[in-house]
Amino acid sequence: MTPLVSSRLVRQKVVSLRLLAGLASLVWAAPLAQAHDALPNSAVLSKSTSTTLRIRFTLDPGLLLYKTLGAGADLEHFLFAYTEMPPVEFAASLAKAQALFAREVMINAPDGQRLVLRQWAWPPASQWQDPMRMQLVILKTKLNDLGHAPPIEISVEAVSTRPIAQLQLSLPKSAMPILVNVAPKDQFWLTDKIPVELIQF
């Protein structure tokens, strides 16, 4: 097989995998999206320097905490419990969810070296419960004309010891399905079925 044919086959496989990921995201997102009219989770990746990658997440706060901390719980009961939780207790639970989320963000260089994550920026605990209360109202009343509960934004830097040209990306399951935009023009879904993607810069 010639290098040109091999390269074409690789590109065709990548396109096919991304199409499958997109379809899978629609299938897996549908039940929860219908449950409370959720906006899709997303992440934007851009290089700020030759060795630094900036990641900005836009996420559904209720589903993020539910998928992280709500194992076995009903979504409505989970949202009610966490919106009524005293601020100190809620902050402690949020800190646990943040640690679990950060642990599952994995960005590796071609040699397998994991990039260092630094300068995490999270909304304060006080900014999480009000959007979750709105989610609960939409879920209980099924009044989709209320719109969407506002998402939360999280950002972080990933630092490499070498200039960034290619990376392997895996994000937390609690954020999936998630639409990933790689500046300036690449876009793909990460899902439970396709949780890893190779990125070219």
Image (cartoon, rainbow, N blue to C red):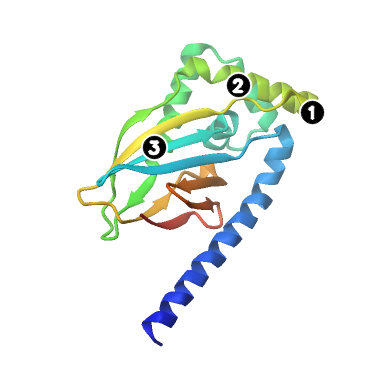
Rendered location of residue 15, percent (x, y): 53, 65
Q: In the rendering, which numbered label is found on residue 15?
A: none
Question: Looking at the image, can residue 104 be seen?
Answer: no
What residue occupies the far left of the structure in this picture? 161
Q: Amino acid at mark 3?
A: Ala
Residue position marked by numbered label 2 in the rendering = 131
Rendered location of residue 113, percent (x, y): 26, 54
- Image quadrant holding the C terminus, namely bottom left
Give the residue displayed 69% in from the left and 23% down from the top. 136
Q: Alpha-carbon distance for marks 3 and 2?
A: 22 Å
Counting residues from the start of the chain, the first of labels 3 and 2 encountered is 3
Counting residues from the start of the chain, the first of labels 1 and 3 encountered is 3
Q: Alpha-carbon distance for marks 2 and 1?
A: 16 Å
Give the residue displayed 28% in from the left and 47% down from the top. 115
Corner quadrant of residue 64: top right
Corner quadrant of residue 104: top left
Residue position marked by numbered label 1 in the rendering = 142
Q: Alpha-carbon distance for marks 1 and 3?
A: 33 Å
Residue position marked by numbered label 3 in the rendering = 102
Corner quadrant of residue 77: top right
Relative to 101, does residue 15 appear above or below in the rendering? below
Task: Single out the mark in the foreground, 3 or 2.
Answer: 2
